[in-house]
Structures are given as structure tokens and as C-alpha cells.
Image (cartoon, coloured by chain):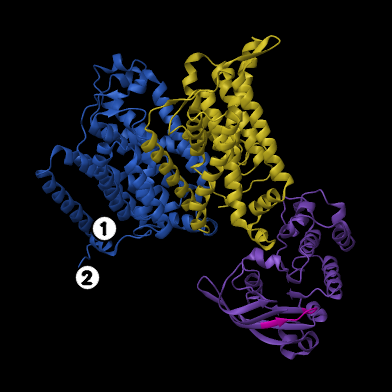
């Protein structure tokens, strides 16, 4: 590695360390509830960034994240589950998997790979078509995945879901995933690949005329997003120790879309900020919802705020840009 | 009949029409010629109420065209036959004609229909087929017929000869002359400046969003500048 | 065996009728504003609960049908006015994110008002009888669904192909600018398409409640999605295609469940959406449309 490349790594690394130190300080005094909430915020941020990678960079409109999360959660959970209990609980597992009991890291990696493979199979036919086909096909994918998880008893335990998944993940795993997703998204965005994706989004025909394979761009963005979604699903399952066919629903897909739109489609930092804001807002409205018995209220608020944003500031918080301050921070030129 | 005074129109960030003023009198055929992008089509779209002027006025009789809704303008008898024909390809020929009569309830009086069929015999033969299957010249005739059925008090024709075979161009111009003889006022946009000036009572040359020259058709046809830039004389 | 097959056929046609009613409106709206209306399925729910409220209030059935049509049309016009006017000219994606948001608002408002508890929905007793034709039998409910759908579709085709409004709707769908130049008030025409399509979907809700006997605030999601599948089968944007797509989907679904062994029946929805992906792969313009119409 050249000296310059090393230098370029120092600033982002310092930012990550500073963020980690900050998180550590916050966690010192945090209640269990707050720790879990922070972990969920971090995972939602990772999901929102991965969705902005898929939808924001190339102008796709995928709603498939919950499907990939479900896939990732089941794959990882099956791999980490106690080898002693597996044969009786999940009788249809092939013997070589039933005997496995992996640590979290390889299980999450496997989840990501399976998620990416499914994305290739689904994305290949659908991405040749326009945006709205993908939206509905990915909604269909959610239904298919939930339907399979519900009916494939011997591997998923059906509607009851998998409970008692070892609690291997923690807020630090969530932090790690967010760092990974942001790093990858950032690298892509400010590279020739990212510019090719943006060209695909802005003017498909013009992009193709300059030799960009737009279908490949979309597929790449879709598959990377799916891979991260599956990994996030895996971490969620190992954080709350349970996954059912209905854990990750269309509503989640909608909320992720809200985060991306409000943050600004294509803006990485926008997605992080919006994810924290929306997750926090829903959490704050929850006590009101429960005491009044008005279930659905917080979701109505979120949806209405999205409609307002679409009408009055359709480009979202940051458009597809990153705030200057953050760009300088990551390039180590904060005070220049 | 039509009086345009100091019209300024923007499309997005571009100032397309700059202080455009012109008139079309009753019974008159006026031609608007000019290069691509000079603002001719923008002028017509503004008159039809599809684009809004930032300043200036356009009056058709007593109707203020800069504020009236498009459907009100059509009702008043200002009929726009747009560039590129814009017929409804998936509708039948008969349905396209019925769309011409839309503001008057979609019904076409038998004598109007008979008149149309004398002008454009081909349309009678093709009544029931989808308009998209017609040839380019036939589609143009359909577009003009559709405009005529709206019984125009002023007809805006945008590039009627564009992309047509020479024979079809001749037919179209014959029809335009026939309409002129009947006293229907016409504002004609044409890239075929020679043919347009030949039949125009009055003509305007548009350059970069402004009316650069005006006069009778004959005067402009004799103008050196017009001859050099628009009639291809050397 | 004949009885079994006949019953499957009637069942499939009834289900297909419901899909067709929803799909036609979906396709009409798509055809005219190039917008996937995710809130369209929720009109099924609105229609179902409107009917239930009136059944409880003792309103006679023919009046209920009329009322559901009107309520559906009004709800559709509201959705169209809220979503479409402010977003005219915005990128397509913005439009369907907005309809998705409207759908979430409708579903969750319904949850707030009605709670998630499913409610029983009963047609009058006569509807649960069965009629005999020679050696075979069919339920009155299914026959009513099939018959009423045919009547509504016939009415729709009359409006779309034989009236001034219908010609204007088709003209607007094809070329908005040219339609405006003909003096069509396109906003009103577009809202008319929302009204008609939504009235059909709401009627499907009335019939849906009658066929399945239970309704809840989220019931619109699956019919909405399946209506899209039906549209894809028939070619998105085509009314006739949406209708045929609905019938094909209903029959295929019933045959899938009826002819395969019992343990596969849970996979019914996977089958439907798997079919969607296969059709998108093989014939993205639909089975009945000759030219591919693609507008970004």
C-alpha cells in the first residue's frame, strides 16, 4: 500500500475510533433499555444506508429489505443454533448443517452470501424492467419468503419461529456493521463505480451511450444492498434471540424507504441521520400509543411526515450529497 | 381577432419568448417562420394555455389567453393542431374525430362529417381502424380533420408538412388553401418557408425568441435577409 | 369427480372475478397517470368495512351495493386528488412512494379506529345455500360474485368504449398534451378514472367479505398485490388484459391448491408471486399485449 493510501485511511479511522469512544461513554451510564434502543438505531441506520445504496445510487425502487433480513436471520440462526437441540427441533436439516454450531461472524457472513445469491436470482429478471416492477416484485418476494418460512416447518419451525437463538450479537456488532456499510457505500459513491451508478439513475440512455452497463449497475447495487440487509437481519436475530416469519414486514420496508427519502435519496449521512430520527420518533410515540390504545398512531405520523416531505422538500435533507463537514472529516481536512 | 402584445415566456430557466407581439386579423392566413428553437412552438403552446406567460398579453376576441384554461380556449374556437400530428394512435379514426368535437359533446353533425369526408376521402374508408396504422400523410390529414371538426374560429397549425412525402405535403397545402378560401383564419408555423410565404397574407420571422421581421407574405419573400436564411437563395 | 372439478371451476372464477375487479381499476389508474397505486388494495378494505357498517345498520342489500360504489368512488377521488395533483411532473418513483405512504396511512388509521381484531361478515342466509345443476352444485355466493362482476365489467366497457368520457379517458391515457389541446379537462378525467377504478375495488371488498366471512383492516394488502400480478399477466395498463389476468390468476390459484397434494396448499402465495417473477422473466409485456410499452 502506498504512503498516500495509508494517509487517506488515517482520517476515517480516527473518526471511527472517536465514534466508538463516544458510544463507549454513552453505554457506560445507559440502562438495558437504552442499550437495546441504541443497537436498534445503529442497525436501522445500517439498513437505511444499504437501502440508499440500492435505491438512492441507481434510482431503483426496492422494497425487498425485509425479505433479505428474514433470509439472513434464519440462515444465521440455523448455523449458530445449539447442535444438541437442532436435530429434534429442525428435523429436516441436512446432517452436515445439523451438526454445525458456528460462531456469529461466519454465520453472519453466510447470511450475507445467501442474501446476495437470492438477490441475483430475483434481480436478474426484474431489473431489466422499470422501477415499479421491482417495487412490486420485491413486495412479492417478502410474501414468498414469509410464506416459505411459515410452511417449511422442518427447517424454520413454522409460525412459531425460532426462539432461543443464542444472544451473540451486541450493540458493538451493530456498530461494526454500520461502520462496514458506511465505509463500503462511501467508497462506492466516490469512485468511478459510484459515478456510473449515478449516471444510471440520472439518465439511463445517456449512461448507456457512454458505455455503462446499466443493468449491471442496478444488479450490483441491488445485490450489495441485499447482502447487507441479510447481515443486519442476522444480527437482529442474535440481538433479540427470536425470529418469526412475520418479524420483518412490509411496514419495515416502508419505514426504511421513509428514512432514505427524508435523508435524501443517495445521501449516506442523510440515511444515518434520518434512521436515528425516525427510530427515535417512533419509540417516543409508543407510550402515547399504548396508553391511548391507538395502535397505528405512530405509523400514521411517520407516513404523513413522508407525504409532507415529498410535497415540500422532495430532495430530502441532503439531496444526494454528503454534508461538507462530514466530507472534510473523512478526508482529514477538517480545518483547511 | 388574435392580438399578442409583449409576451414573455420562460421554460424552466430559459427565457424563450421575449416581448413577442403580433396579430392575426379575421379571415387572414398568417405564417410564423424561423429556425429550430426560435420559439414558434412555444408561442402556440402559450396561446393554447398549455404554457403560461410571465408577462404580456394575448387576446383572442374578448378572451384573455394568458389566464384561461386550455378547455376554455378550445371552447372559444382557438384550435391547435400540434407539431408531430399527435393523433391518438390506439383510438379508431372515428374516435379521433369525435375527440375533435369533445367540447361540444362529442357529437359530429352529419353535414360536418360529410364535409370532412369530401376534404379527406381516405378518412371515410379508414373510419374503424386504429389511427396508429395510418401512414404519416394520412395521420396528418386525420389531425387536420380533427382540428376542423372542432369548428375553429382560429386554427393554429404547427409544422403540418414536417416529415411528410412531397405528395402528401402538396395535399396538405391544398387543404390549407381551401380553408383560407372559406375564411377560416389560420396561424401557420412552417419550416417550408417558401410554401408558407407563398400562401400567407401576413408573415412574421422569429429569431431567438423575438419577432425579427414582419410584413405581407410577398414582402418577406422578397426580403434579402429572408431569402438568404430561410429560402435558401444564394 | 365432475362435481369436484365444477366446484373448483366456480370457485376459481369467483376468486378470479374479485381479482379482476381490483386489477381493472389498478390498470386504469396506471394507464392514465403511469402511477402504481399501492393504496388501491386498501379500497377493498374500505369497501368491506363500509358494507359491514351498513349491514349492522340494517340497510337493504341493493342499497348497500350502491352505497359502496359511491363511497369507493369518493375515496378514490380523494386519493387521486391528494397524491396526483401535487406530484404532477415529479419523477415516477416519488409518485409511488406517495401512494405507499397513503396506503400506510389508510391501514393504520383503520387499525386505530377499528383495531386489528377480525370481524365476522355475513351475507344473508340465502347466499349460503347451494344450487344444483343436474349432477353438480355451486354456492349462491360464488355465482353472485361471478354474475355481478360480469355486469360491472360490461358497464365499465360501455363507459370506456362507448361514451364521450371513456374516449376522453383513453385519449388522455395515450397523450395527455393532445387531449388538453382537444379541450379535455384532464384533471377531471383522471379523477374520473380514479373514481371508477376505486368503485370497482370497493365492490370487490363487499364481495370479498361475503366470500371469506371475515374482514380486518389489513385485508387489502394481498388483493392489491395480486391485482398487480393479474395486471402483469395481462399487460399493465390494459383494461381487458387486467380482467383476463384476474380470471387466469384466480383459476390458476384454485387449481394449484385443488390439484396438488394437501401439504402444498400453504405455498399458494409463493406460487402466485413466483408466477409473477417467471412472467416478468419470460414475457414482461404481458400475455395479451403485442407491443412493449415502456415509459420511465
User: Which region of the structure is painted magenta?
Assistant: B22-29
**Residue C202 magenta-drawn?**
no
- In the rendered image, the vertical position of residue A220 relative to residue C229, given as above or below: below
Closer to us: mark 1 or mark 2? 2
| Residue A213 can be seen in this image | no
Residue A10 lies, in percent from the top left, at 20, 57
Residue C71 lies, in percent from the top left, at 53, 41
Identify the residue position indicated by label 1 in the image. Answer: A5
Q: Which residue lies furthest to the front in this view?
A: C58
Which quadrant of the rendered structure holds the C terminus of chain A?
bottom left
Q: In this view, does B74 lie to the left or right of A182?
A: right
Name the tint of chain B in the rendering: purple
Q: Which chain carries label 1?
A: A
Residue B89 lies, in percent from the top left, at 72, 53
Give the Cα separation between the discs numbered 1 and 2: 20 Å
Q: Mark 2 lies on which chain?
A: A
Q: Is residue C108 left or right of residue B7?
A: left
Q: Which one of the lettered chains is coloured yellow?
A: C
Name the tint of chain A in the rendering: blue
Would you identify the image quadrant in which residue C73 lies?
A: top right
Identify the residue position indicated by label 2 in the image. Answer: A336
Question: Dot 2 surroundings within 10 Å: few (below 14), some, or many (20 or more)?
Answer: few
**Residue B27 magenta-drawn?**
yes
- In the rendered image, the vertical position of residue C40 relative to residue C296, given as above or below: above
Q: Is residue C254 left or right of residue C217?
A: right
- In the rendered image, the vertical position of residue C206 relative to residue B152, given as above or below: above
Question: Viewer-proximal residue, C124 or B184?
Answer: C124
Q: In this view, does B121 lie to the left or right of A8?
A: right
Would you identify the image quadrant in which residue A62 lies?
A: top left
Q: State the residue at coordinates (42%, 21%).
A: A151
Amino acid at each position: 500500500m502506498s504512503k498516500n493510501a495509508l494517509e487517506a485511511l488515517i482520517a476515517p479511522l480516527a473518526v471511527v475510533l472517536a465514534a466508538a469512544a463516544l458510544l463507549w461513554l454513552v453505554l457506560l451510564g445507559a440502562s438495558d433499555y437504552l442499550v437495546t434502543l441504541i443497537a436498534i438505531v445503529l442497525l436501522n441506520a445500517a439498513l437505511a444506508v444499504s437501502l440508499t445504496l440500492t435505491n438512492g445510487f441507481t434510482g431503483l425502487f426496492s422494497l425487498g429489505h425485509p425479505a433479505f433480513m428474514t433470509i439472513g436471520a434464519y440462515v444465521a440462526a440455523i448455523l449458530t443454533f445449539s447442535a444438541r437441540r437442532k436435530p429434534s427441533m429442525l428435523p429436516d436439516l441436512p446432517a452436515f448443517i445439523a451438526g454445525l454450531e458456528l460462531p456469529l461472524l461466519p454465520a453472519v457472513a453466510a447470511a450475507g452470501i445467501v442474501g446476495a445469491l437470492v438477490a441475483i436470482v430475483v434481480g436478474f429478471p426484474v431489473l431489466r424492467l422499470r422501477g415499479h416492477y421491482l417495487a412490486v416484485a420485491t413486495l412479492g418476494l417478502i410474501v414468498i419468503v414469509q410464506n416459505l418460512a411459515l410452511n417449511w416447518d422442518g427447517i424454520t419451525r413454522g409460525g412459531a419461529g425460532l426462539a432461543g437463538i443464542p444472544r451473540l450479537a451486541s450493540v458493538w456488532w451493530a456498530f461494526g456493521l454500520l461502520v462496514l456499510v458506511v465505509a463500503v457505500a462511501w467508497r462506492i459513491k466516490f469512485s468511478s463505480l459510484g459515478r456510473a451508478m449515478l449516471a444510471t439513475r440520472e439518465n439511463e440512455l445517456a449512461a448507456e451511450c457512454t458505455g455503462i452497463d446499466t443493468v449491471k449497475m442496478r444488479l450490483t447495487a441491488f445485490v450489495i444492498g441485499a447482502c447487507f440487509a441479510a447481515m443486519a437481519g442476522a444480527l437482529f436475530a442474535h440481538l433479540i434471540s427470536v425470529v418469526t416469519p412475520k418479524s420483518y414486514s412490509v411496514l419495515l420496508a416502508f419505514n426504511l424507504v421513509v428514512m432514505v427519502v427524508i435523508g435524501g435519496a443517495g445521501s449516506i449521512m442523510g440515511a444515518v441521520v434520518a434512521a436515528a430520527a425516525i427510530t427515535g420518533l417512533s419509540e417516543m410515540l409508543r407510550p402515547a400509543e399504548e396508553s391511548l390504545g391507538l395502535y397505528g398512531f405512530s405509523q400514521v405520523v411517520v407516513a404523513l411526515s413522508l407525504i409532507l416531505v415529498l410535497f415540500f422538500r422532495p430532495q430530502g435533507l441532503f439531496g444526494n450529497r454528503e454534508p461538507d463537514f462530514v466530507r472534510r472529516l473523512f478526508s482529514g481536512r477538517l480545518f483547511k | 381577432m388574435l392580438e399578442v402584445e409583449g409576451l414573455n415566456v420562460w421554460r424552466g430557466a430559459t427565457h424563450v419568448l421575449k416581448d413577442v407581439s403580433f396579430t392575426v386579423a379575421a379571415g387572414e392566413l398568417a405564417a410564423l417562420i424561423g429556425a429550430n428553437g426560435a420559439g414558434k412552438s412555444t408561442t402556440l403552446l402559450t396561446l393554447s394555455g398549455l404554457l403560461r406567460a410571465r408577462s404580456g398579453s394575448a387576446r383572442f376576441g374578448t378572451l384573455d389567453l394568458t389566464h384561461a384554461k386550455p378547455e376554455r380556449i378550445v371552447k372559444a374556437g382557438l384550435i391547435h393542431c400540434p407539431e408531430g400530428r399527435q393523433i391518438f394512435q390506439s383510438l379508431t379514426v372515428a374516435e379521433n374525430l369525435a375527440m375533435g368535437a369533445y367540447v361540444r359533446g362529442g357529437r359530429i353533425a352529419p353535414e360536418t362529417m360529410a364535409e370532412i369526408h369530401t376534404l379527406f376521402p381516405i378518412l371515410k374508408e379508414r373510419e374503424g381502424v386504429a389511427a396508429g396504422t395510418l401512414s404519416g400523410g394520412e395521420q396528418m390529414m386525420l389531425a387536420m380533420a380533427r382540428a376542423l371538426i372542432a369548428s375553429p374560429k382560429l386554427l393554429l397549425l404547427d409544422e403540418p408538412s414536417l416529415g411528410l412525402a412531397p405528395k402528401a405535403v402538396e395535399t396538405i397545402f391544398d387543404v390549407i388553401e381551401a380553408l383560407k378560401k372559406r375564411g377560416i383564419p389560420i396561424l401557420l408555423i412552417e419550416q417550408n418557408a417558401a410554401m408558407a410565404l407563398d400562401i400567407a397574407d401576413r408573415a412574421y420571422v422569429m429569431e431567438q425568441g423575438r419577432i425579427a421581421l414582419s410584413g405581407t407574405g410577398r414582402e418577406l419573400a422578397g426580403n434579402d435577409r429572408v431569402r438568404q436564411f430561410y429560402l435558401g437563395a444564394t | 369427480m365432475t362435481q369436484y372439478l365444477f366446484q373448483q371451476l366456480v370457485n376459481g372464477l369467483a376468486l378470479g372475478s374479485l381479482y379482476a375487479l381490483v386489477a381493472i381499476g389498478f390498470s386504469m389508474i396506471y394507464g392514465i397517470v403511469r402511477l402504481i397505486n399501492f393504496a388501491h388494495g386498501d379500497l377493498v378494505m374500505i369497501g368491506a368495512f363500509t358494507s359491514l357498517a351498513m349491514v349492522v345498520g340494517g340497510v337493504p342489500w341493493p342499497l348497500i351495493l350502491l352505497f359502496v360504489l359511491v363511497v369507493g368512488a369518493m375515496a378514490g377521488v380523494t386519493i387521486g386528488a391528494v397524491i396526483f395533483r401535487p406530484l404532477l411532473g415529479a419523477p415516477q418513483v416519488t409518485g409511488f412512494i406517495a401512494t405507499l405512504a397513503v396506503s400506510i396511512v389508510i391501514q393504520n388509521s383503520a387499525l386505530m379506529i377499528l383495531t386489528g381484531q377480525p370481524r365476522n361478515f355475513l351475507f344473508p342466509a340465502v347466499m349460503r345455500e347451494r344450487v344444483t345443476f343436474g349432477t353438480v352444485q355451486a354456492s349462491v355466493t360464488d355465482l353472485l360474485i361471478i354474475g355481478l362482476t360480469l355486469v360491472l365489467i360490461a358497464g365499465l366497457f360501455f363507459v370506456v368504449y362507448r361514451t364521450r368520457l371513456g374516449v376522453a379517458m383513453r385519449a388522455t391515457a395515450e397523450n395527455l398534451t393532445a387531449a388538453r389541446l382537444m379541450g379535455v379537462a384532464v384533471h377531471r378525467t383522471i379523477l374520473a378514472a380514479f373514481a371508477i377504478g376505486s368503485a370497482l375495488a370497493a365492490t370487490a371488498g363487499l364481495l370479498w367479505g361475503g366470500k371469506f366471512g371475515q374482514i380486518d383492516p389489513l385485508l387489502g394488502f394481498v388483493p392489491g398485490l395480486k391485482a398487480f400480478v393479474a395486471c402483469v399477466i395481462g399487460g399493465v395498463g390494459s383494461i381487458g388484459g387486467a380482467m383476463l389476468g384476474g380470471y387466469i390468476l384466480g383459476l390458476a390459484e384454485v387449481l394449484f391448491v385443488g390439484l396438488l397434494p394437501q401439504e402444498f396448499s400453504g405455498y399458494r402465495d409463493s406460487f402466485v408471486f413466483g408466477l409473477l417473477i417467471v412472467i416478468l422473466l419470460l414475457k414482461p409485456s404481458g400475455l395479451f399485449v403485442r407491443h412493449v410499452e415502456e415509459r420511465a
